Amino acid sequence: MNKETPHFIFKEKKLEENYREFERLCEKHVGDYVIAYSIKTNGFGALINKLHELGSNFEVASMEEIMKTPEKSKVFNGSCKTDEELQMAIDGRFLINVDSKSEIDRIVKLREGKEFNVSLRVSLDEGKFGFESNKLEGAIDYCFMNNLKVIGLSFHPGTQKNFRHYGDYVRQVEKVIENIKDKVELKYLDIGGGFPDKIQLKNLGVKLEDYFELIASLKKFNAKIVFEPGRFLVADAFELITKINVIKQKDGKNYAILDAGINLLSKITLAKYWFEKVQNSDSDNKPPHSDKQNENEYILAGPLLFGNDVVGRFKGNLKEGDLMKVTNVGAYCFNLAWEISYRKPRVFIE
Ligand SMILES: Cc1ncc(COP(=O)(O)O)c(C=O)c1O
């Protein structure tokens, strides 16, 4: 079938493989755990359905995300929760990671003072909301005085974390819990997401299992460990097919202008995108790399009229009309896709 470009391809099998790998490591190193896929990473409907079928729970952060996810255990995060969202979370018995005194007060009001279980989000650095670790005890007492029982703590290290930073993060989490462990009966310890995608793991020379070996030290707190993975599960489960519409030279450089640019391959995803030429039937008949001496270097640029609409480089022979496959685009690209000059691409399921 001749599909319009650009388009995404959702690779269901890859997602399943990734989920099973993550689950296997949870079994091996953690034992008592919950996987709650972070839906902000990629909210494509068929992907959510597949994860549901595989047994995943969901981490949500807005009404939109609550409505998009199946009736299943949900972890509710967010620094901007509305009363309507909180009411839904209370009614649905989500694990609510409360991140401020105002939110405690609003839950108390919505519950009309009746008992309720909550989890508190802890901020480990200035850039993240949550209770500072030195205010945590006060927040736990305040909950207690208001008939809210703290049954969990929640942390998140940020995304695409390298191994050394992740080690520091786990030690910080341990320290915070050590300080309050006599005050709360910790049922849930939510350690968020942050696991790198496979390309990044390879670049760092580490395996996902190395991260799990660090996490295993948290088992001593006897809580169910809640994971909110995003990127690791979906990064290589999506590809983008884009067409080279124009080849041009400027200032002695070759440019291949694609019909996808930073509108779809945003830099803020922190992912390294990988470009390959899709072989057409002509070139399929030739041995690969047959014309190495005549290879050119191309700057791959997008169709937007922005100076920074450059998405990669490619060495080889390109011509107008060629298709390129971009891999490692499953995390954040689909959700962040801008509708600027072009509409959001369709997704085909493979
Ligand atoms: C609270 C929270 N949990 C989980 C994630 C998913 O992170 P990642 O895609 O790095 O696994 C995010 C994304 O930054 C997040 O903000």
Image (cartoon, rainbow, N blue to C red):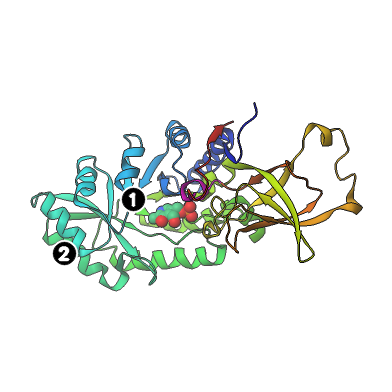
Q: Position of residue 249 (x, y in %)?
A: 77, 59
Can you say whether 334 is above or below 315 in the image? above
Magenta stretch in the rendered image: 330-338
Q: Quadrant of residue 179?
A: bottom left
Split into 4 quadrants, where in the image is the C terminus? top right
Looking at the image, can residue 37 be seen?
yes
**Residue ID at (82%, 48%):** 317
Q: Amino acid at mark 1?
A: Ala
Q: Badge 2: how crowded within 10 Å, few (<14), some, or many (20+)?
A: some
Frontmost residue, 43 versus 77: 43
Classify residue 339 as left or right of residue 285.
left
**Which residue appears farthest toward the top when viewing the image?**
1
Frontmost residue, 229 versus 225: 229
Give the numbered dot on residue 61.
1
Q: Is mark 2 within 8 Å of ligand 1?
A: no
Q: Position of residue 220 (x, y in %)?
A: 40, 57
Label located before the other in sequence (1 or 2): 1
Frontmost residue, 198 versus 22: 198
Frontmost residue, 221 versus 331: 331
SS of the residue at dot 1?
Answer: loop
Q: Is mark 1 within 8 Å of ligand 1?
A: yes
Give the numbered dot on residue 142.
2
Q: Amino acid at mark 2?
A: Tyr
Q: How many angstroms separate mark 1 from mark 2 (CA)?
A: 24 Å
**Residue ID at (39%, 50%):** 225
Can you say whether 219 is above or below 12 in the image? below
